[in-house]
Image: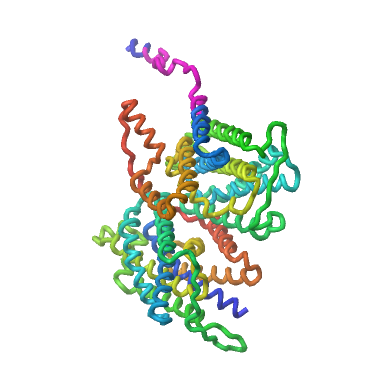
Amino acid sequence: MDEDKASLNKPTELPEELRKKPIIERGAIDLMAIAIFFLLITPLLSVHRVTDFMIFCIFAMSFDLLYGYMGRLSFGQMLYLGTGAYCCGLFIKYIGGNPLLAISIGIAFAGMLAMLLGLIIVRTTGACFALINLAFNHIGFFLVLSPLREITRGEDGFGVSASKLGVLNFGSRPIMFGFVLLCLLLVYYCLRRLTSSPYGILIRSIKEDETRVRFLGYNTFLYKWFTFILAGAIAGLAGSLTALNYNYVNPNAMDVHSNVGVVFACLIGGAGNLYGAILGGVIYMVISNFLPIYIYRWEMFLGFSLLIIVFRFRMGVWGYIQRFWEYTIKRKVVPRLMKKEAI
Amino acid sequence: MIYTIVYGLTIGAILYFISIGLSLTFGAMRVINFAHTLTYTIGVYVLITLVNFFKWCFPLGAILAILAVIPIGYIIERFIIRRLYGESLDYTFIATFAIALIGVDAIKWIWSVRPYPISDPIGKYLLFWGLSLPIYRIVIVMIAIILFFALNIFFKKTIVGKIVVAALEDKDGVRCLGVNVDKYFSIVFILGSALAALGGVLYAPIGSVHPYMGLSVLLLSFAVVIVGGMGNLNGTFLSAFALGMVMSITARYWSQGAETMVFIVMAIVLIFKPIDI
């Protein structure tokens, strides 16, 4: 009896490998790996193209936060990208050429729009969430195209030329590349920290079962709202960077049909994982940039590969890499992917 | 003003044809079918081919086009939709969208991207208090109203209709009675596809024909289904005509805003009456 009590009172010792502090933090290795990956593919493609890829990856991560982590499929994430692009571009065009200020304006406006619309959108789930996002995206596209034509120049779009800011000359490709890479790493790092914090666990539990989370006493609305705003703001960052990268903004930045691309990117990479989002973003951009050159019927190819993903390949590329790693290299038994519960 | 009303009713009728199938699949099978308007587009293209072949005999071409769509609807239902029952929503979204992509690309492959014009098959005008209304549009509205009553009889009187209505309420309950629900749902799916093709065939002479025409009308018919209530046939009828009127009245004063107005209505409806799937 006494012995038991003694053993209970004794502080439990951590296992050996957990107490050891790693020499470099894991986060730093991740960041380096991503940077090296993008630097390695640069000579294969071109600097401009890889910059484009990285911007898309930032956008894919913002979508992944909503879809992969919180389980809300949105068909209108382009609205926030477009808002970011337009606000950034309009700021440069009408007010001042400072690029950093323009980017923060883009992020702020996209975040504020998400804040306003989120009050309505976040209350819904499932199909309703997807369709209401689609509706707002359509309204935004229309606003840019027609009633605000005086400011946004309608279908033609307008040129954006940011002024130089010390070393930060967005006209030169390598500096743009470096800046976008820095943004990507920053977004990745912040989201990594956020999603592995208690907040991240909470939004993942909202994905699993929101009612139970509410039973535990959490105000799920606030968490969902915050996630929605964060996703909107990151999409706004991606939009601002797009405007600066192309030196040009037109309504394509808000096109409703482009939402499919980001959904596809997230699925092919593996939803619910930031690495998956980045990998999926790169794969999607490679497909959409190079496939039309080699395969004439590329939409059909995209359709068939989506069907295969949905029926056979649900974990995405990153999911399979992860499983392969744990199964063969670490010799861990991983349960097979369960069939999703019926709704 | 009379013109506006007639145009609104025509658009409403077309939206009604397309939305019935969508509403039933949405309500009964909990599958959001992005590929629904694929049959609409295919119907139109088959009609174009047949009309050239039959030397402008429009009704025969229209009937054959609708019949041609039925096997396509069956194939989609049997091999894709049937596997998606009870799956989570995002996968059904993506799988049906993939079918839509494949279908659009196949249409581009067979018929090329070039838009085709089709002229009004009746081409006569009804003179009425000094107004000249195209008879064709009136015929469309008449067909919609006849169809509404026919469907009501179908769902109230025939055994297939009764089973489907019961299954919309409680799928498991009907299955417990020993009825093979999936078989009836596939009949409903094919019926919906054929009606979508009917909508396309009737719309082709007054609209423009291009491979992406299905995708643009799909969003509108989603709005109709959401405003009218999923699986609610009378609601779909009313909301289709109401949204058709919204479109034509908006277009009268502000021509670019017509489609957007529909989405504003849909957003308002979703805010006050959220659907829960």
| Residue A165: % across, % down | 72, 34
Residue name at image x 46 percent, y 67 percent: B236
Q: Determine if residue A219 is in view.
A: no
Q: Foreground: A305 or B40? A: A305
Q: Foreground: A104 or A279? A: A279
Q: Foreground: A129 or A254? A: A254
The quadrant the N terminus of chain A occupies is: top left
Please state the extent of the stretch shown in magenta in the rendering: A7-30
Relative to residue B162, is residue A234 drawn left or right? right
| Residue B84: % across, % down | 35, 53
Relative to residue B100, is residue B4 drawn left or right? right
Q: Determine if residue B257 is in view.
A: yes
Residue name at image x 54 percent, y 31 percent: A189
B102 over A289 or under it: above or below: below
Relative to residue B154, is residue B8 drawn left or right? right
Residue sitting at the far left: B178
Residue name at image x 46 percent, y 42 percent: A283
A26 over B239 or under it: above or below: above
Residue sitting at the far right: A95
Q: How is the image coloured?
A: rainbow
| Residue A132: % across, % down | 53, 54
B165 over A202 or under it: above or below: below
Residue name at image x 42 percent, y 69 percent: B45
| Residue A147: % across, % down | 67, 60
Q: Foreground: B53 or A59? A: B53
Relative to residue B43, is residue A36 drawn left or right? right
B260 over B207 or under it: above or below: above
Does the magenta segment cover residue A21?
Answer: yes
Does the magenta segment cover residue B264?
Answer: no
